[in-house]
Amino acid sequence: MADHEDTLVEVREAVMHPPSGGNPTRRKAHFLKPLLKEHDKDLPSPPGSLFSPESITNKTRYQMKSYKRNPTENWKIWVERLKPRWQEIWKQAGIYEAILASTYTFSKDKDLIIGLAERWCAETNTLVFPWGEVSITLEDVIFLGNYSVLGASFFSPVADENVSILSGLKRVHRECSRNRGQVVTASKWMQYFMCGGDQLEHEAFLAMWLSKFVVICSADHISVRNFQAAINLSRGNRIALAPLVLASIYRDMRLLHNSIVESVVEMSFSICHGDLVHMWAWERFPNLRPPPSVVERGEPRSARWNGVEIMKVKDMRAALDSAKELFMWRPYSITSSDCMLSNLYRDDEQWVVVDSDETESYARCLRVSWLVGSGHIEQYLPHRVAMQFGYDQDVPPRVVLPNQSPETAWRSYRRRIRGTKLYIPPRLFESDVSSRYMVWWKSFMSVNEETPGCDEEISEDEIPIAQLMSQSRKTKNSGKRFNLEPKEDAVMSKCDDHTEVDPDNSKDCNSSEAARVEVKTLDAPDCPSEVAERQEEFVDEDSMTITQLLSRSETNGCLGMTPSGKQNKCNSCTGNPTDLEADSVIAVANDEVVRKASCPEHNIVNIKEESSGSSPSESPQLDLEARIWRLEKIFEIIKAEKLAASSGRILG
């Protein structure tokens, strides 16, 4: 049956694998859109190479600045003085918790920020670790920053009746600057408005809050460009500040990553919302976080980290790269918070229609879109980190959003989403990854293995596979590894391994023949005799040469590759094969808008128990598929190089 066009989630039967290892199971899986086609074997390129520079030993040369400074006592006093009168307006505008959080203090962990920036991928705005791909999402900004994903644009003009208020704020700004062109500091601004009960005090307060804690251009300056938003907020009008804040985080992480890649010896860097990056890491890496504070009723979740001392970690990179078993995929569904999204995280799965602020906020966290920042635009790709929302992970298509103006990008973000059907996983559900994702990720990790080179002139057939793949990776990335900034004129109409998106529904894009990758489906499980042989003597096929591997495959009585590229089958094997790609789409019931169950309907089948004679190791079929995939890529590289060399001799 055809998939529903008005849903953000695709449901189908699939063989799923625990990301931390374990037996695969066939069950009903839920994937975030956009997706590759069900049987599409042309897998996209991975999210860039894992960047592994030498450890930064002299971190004293790296000075971390943060434009968002800890609050002064005068600011805390101002917040407490205005809260009784204006808190209802703040709640109506969706900024009450964010204003309270502006009175909190946060320590700076330079090693943590640098460790995260090393793993940042500017192409996808994600963090790529050896154990998986994760990111800071709109959900994180809602829970930790207390900003809204709903509302008008930050750059919306004021209503006609409020133009006089805008003129009044500009007049005071000129007076505080003494002479034209001089900046207005926060201390001057507070001194002017806190003393006399000016009628513009509330608008001036919000203008300072925006300048120092939200749209930060300087550590201590009041910006005139924030006045319109301050006036709109003072009237209780909601503004979508979350995409603005997340866009600035993406920009700062990209700039810091590029500086590290370029091996800048001495560097001073700024993370405007460094507190949010810290809190994101503390929520998700238990091995890195300090003991949290006790949160009182009515306090935002960020109060957990108010005033805590940073934890000293000897080797930050090792701690991050080894966090496979520790990473918290869904910290907000496990513990309760005073956040409207918390009401959606229930013990049972749900199908709902997006018809309220709560469900619309959650849905916007799940949809691919643009994020309009202050002077820049960033891609938001939640389908790459679906497990952070409780969904299963498939190979994410490479989404390329064409360059747009801020106005067009904002309209794309704001496009209608109400009326969409939305699946919400159980709050304690543990997501899995698809079979082709396992193959894709294993191949990605193999490509990123660092293997010493060989100076002698030898045939490609004598080079170990792992080493040849390492050399091909270096050749492929040569000249563009450090160029992570997106091109301004990069409007994609067609692509190789990219997918141009609506972005509600993914559209397929044919890959070039040179970049085609064929993932083969095994016809039969391993035979018992081969399993016994592997148990007696383990052979690392990645360390073998191509000639040795082909010779081994020719003499193998069971599964393997022949020189023609076909697979041998074991005649003694019995039992039904497991088709890893045979995933049928299950349609959502039209009449059932909201469905609850005591537990998810997984219909789990243990593949290990069903398969006769399967290996005790984790999914040997997938290991073989990964090796086949790598070997095919090697043959393509060798063929292309020999063809180029032959052409050169003919021309010569």
Image (spheres, helix red, strand yellow):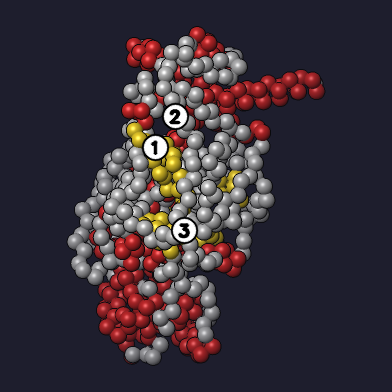
Q: Is residue 567 above or below residue 192?
A: above
Asked whether, in this view, residue 331 is left or right of residue 589, the answer is left
The image shows residue 141 at horizontal and vertical percentages of 39, 61
Q: CA distance from mark 2 to mark 3?
A: 31 Å
Which residue is at a point 57% across and 67% down the rendered structure image?
411
Label 1 or label 3, whichever lies nearer to me, is 3
Asked whether, in this view, residue 473 is left or right of residue 329, the answer is right
Q: Amino acid at mark 1?
A: Arg
Q: Is residue 636 visible?
A: yes
Residue assigned mark 1: 26
Residue assigned mark 3: 590
Q: CA distance from mark 1 to mark 3?
A: 25 Å
The image shows residue 386 at horizontal and vertical percentages of 42, 49
Label 2 or label 3, whichever lies nearer to me, is 3
Is disc 1 placed on a helix, strand or loop? strand
Q: Is residue 319 above or below residue 627?
A: below
Q: Amino acid at mark 2?
A: Thr
Which residue is at a point 30% across and 50% down the rendered structure image?
599
- Give the camera-side residue of 352 and 443: 352
Q: Are marks 2 and 1 in contact (CB under 8 Å)?
A: yes
Q: Amino acid at mark 3?
A: Asn
- Give the camera-side residue of 574 and 649: 574
Residue assigned mark 2: 578
The image shows residue 40 at horizontal and vertical percentages of 56, 38
Is disc 3 placed on a helix, strand or loop? loop
Q: Are marks 1 and 3 in contact (CB under 8 Å)?
A: no
Q: Is residue 618 visible?
A: no
Is disc 2 placed on a helix, strand or loop? loop
